[in-house]
Image (cartoon, rainbow, N blue to C red):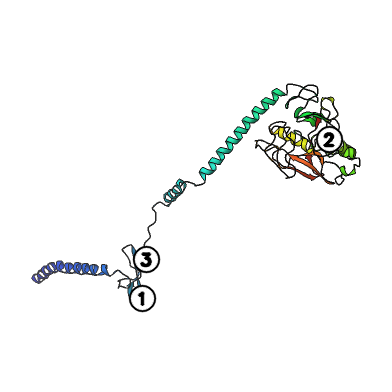
Amino acid sequence: MSCGIQGEKMMNRKTLPTVGLIIILIGSSNIAEAAPQVKAGAKCLKVGLIQTVNAKKFTCIKSGGKMVWDKGRLIVSTPTNPKTSNESAETSSQSEPNPFQAEVQKALDNKKKEVDSATDLIKAERSKFEELFKTKCDKNSPCQVGNKGPGGGVVVYVGQSRQAWGQYLEMAPSGWYSSVKIKLPGVQANGIGDPATYWCENFEMDLTASVTSQELKGKLGIEIGKGFSNTQLMIAGCKSGAGKLANSYTGGGLNDWFLPSIAELNELCKFASGIKTGMGLRYLGGSSSNETTCGTREMPGSFTALGEFSRGENNKYWSSSENSNNRAWCQRFDDLWTSNWEKFNQFLVRPVRAF
């Protein structure tokens, strides 16, 4: 009995390695056979089994009662660090030159040069006229543009010869309104600079047309030398307004200050811009213009280089020259704009006097 058992054990010892070898060979054979078959439509062994071949992921599915590999999905690689990738793309985008940057920078540099140049010019002009203003002149002594006039203002115009109205024009200094004791209705005081008011409270009355005397009518108009008579007509026909306001100034103890005609006002604009005066009106309502008009040079700031006149589209100055029943001429001090506007507008006022 024991002998039989021993023989059986010996047989098992010899058989086990052989069986194991057969199993390994069969398994190896199945793996070898399965690997090449991982493609769309080929048989697979278990539903849900996943295999990756040539950057494609295949899944074992059941189709028509059979287990087969699906069509597979292409594996798309993603950056290992998305943040780093985005930063790199942004840096790359920023590193590309902006084609407009050089042009814009050039324009900015040129603008700065213009402003610096204008500022230097303004300083030079102010220094020059500060020196000239130290000399006081009157009608009996030759005056230069920039001298101090009898009324304490600055001489802005010198005629070639003495006329019936005089030869020189002086303008009131900036801040002149602070010394005016008579306060008229409709005046807007700005604290600094020039006050503003309407041309006349009679917005629809043509004062010039009311004058029947040809002698008096000949003294009115837009030319140099007409401002005083224009203002006298405004004083006669208006209870308040720009003419009355200009005449209320008594600088130097004198009461002959008036609102300048449009040609006289244009000379003030030339002076304020550092342009030679005494060449007559060269621009009126779009009829003609050239470099001698006024305000053609761009300057920094909200005031002119000389005289501290307010600049800007809304900062117009009234003249005493009437245009029609409801319009009168005015002047901007930052460009060529000389035009006529409705008399009810609140525009700025700067008095002048002739001697």
Neighbourhood count class around disc 3 (C-alpha, 10 Å): few under 14, some 14–19, many 20 upward: few
**Is residue 66 visible from the viewing direction of this image?**
yes
User: Which residue is labeled 2 in the image?
Assistant: 245
Viewer-nearest residue: 181 or 59: 181
- At a point 70% along the width and 24% down the height, the residue shown is 130
User: Which residue is labeled 1 in the image?
Assistant: 63
- The vertical placement of 351 against 55, above or below, is above
Mark 2 vs mark 3: in front: 2
**Is residue 172 visible from the viewing direction of this image?**
no
Quadrant location of residue 276?
top right
Where residue 354 appears, as percent x and y from the top left, is: 81, 29
- At a point 85% along the width and 26% down the height, the residue shown is 254
Q: Are marks 3 and 1 in contact (CB under 8 Å)?
A: no
Furthest-bottom residue in this view: 64
Judging from the image, what secondary structure is the residue with disc 3 in?
A: strand
Furthest-right residue in this view: 212
Amino acid type of the residue that numbered disc 2 sits on in the rendered structure: Leu
Judging from the image, what secondary structure is the residue with disc 1 in?
A: strand
Amino acid type of the residue that numbered disc 3 sits on in the rendered structure: Arg
Q: CA distance from mark 3 to mark 1?
A: 17 Å
User: Which residue is labeled 3 in the image?
Assistant: 73
